[in-house]
Image (spheres, rainbow, N blue to C red):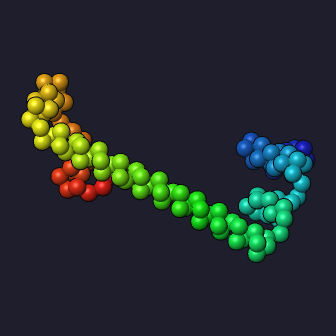
């Protein structure tokens, strides 16, 4: 490194980059080249039982995600219908106007008129 500097082969940014590369090689060793993504190999070999277990865990996770999505969808439908009924009430709309809240977000207005999920 010092020879390259004295011979004007490495200067400035290139010198700092090479110094950092040397420090990383001292810390990690040369195994970085054998694994370009920097990922560590699995600690244990994959077995058919392990793959089945991982598949079942992922299927369970996705089923739970579906249940949560369905619950959220039903709650959204309830809130949308309640808001639609409130907007049909003249007294409620008068109250909103009095408070300066007569406008609503375009997506909310569209979902109320179309009845489509947002």
Q: Relative to residue 34, is residue 70 depicted above or below?
A: above
Left or right position of 112 against 77: left
Task: Report the residue at 22% width, 42% height from top.
Answer: 83
Question: Measuring 26% from the left and 57% from the top, which residue is drawn there?
Answer: 116
- The residue lying toward the viewer, choosing from 25 and 54, is 54
Q: Where is residue 72 in the image (x, y as percent from the top left)?
A: 40, 50
Q: Which residue is drawn at 72% across and 44% down?
A: 13
Residue 117 visible in the shown view: yes
Image coordinates of residue 17 in percent, x first then y, are: 76, 47
- Residue situated furthest bottom in the rendering: 48
Camera-side residue of 111 and 53: 53
Count every numbered label the image shows and give the total: 0
Residue 48 horizontal/vertical position (percent): 76, 75
Q: Could you say which is closer to the camera, residue 32 or residue 43?
A: 43
Q: Which of 117 and 10 is in front in this view?
A: 117
Which residue extends farthest top? 99
**In the picture, residue 35 is in which quadrant?**
bottom right
Q: Left or right of 58: which side holds 12?
A: right
Residue 20: which quarter of the image?
Answer: top right
Residue 11 seen in the figure: no
Work out whether 96 lies above or below 86: above
């Amino acid at each position: 490194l010092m020879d390259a500097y004295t011979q004007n082969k490495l200067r400035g940014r290139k010198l700092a980059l090479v110094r950092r590369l040397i420090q990383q090689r001292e810390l990690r060793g040369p195994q970085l080249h054998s694994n370009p993504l920097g990922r560590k190999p699995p600690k244990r070999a994959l077995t058919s039982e392990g793959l089945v277990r991982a598949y079942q865990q992922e299927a369970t996770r996705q089923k739970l995600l579906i249940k949560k999505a369905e619950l959220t969808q039903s709650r959204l439908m309830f809130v949308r219908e309640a808001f639609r009924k409130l907007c049909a009430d003249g007294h409620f709309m008068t109250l909103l106007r009095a408070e300066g809240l007569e406008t609503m977000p375009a997506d909310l207005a569209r979902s109320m008129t179309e009845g489509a999920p947002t």
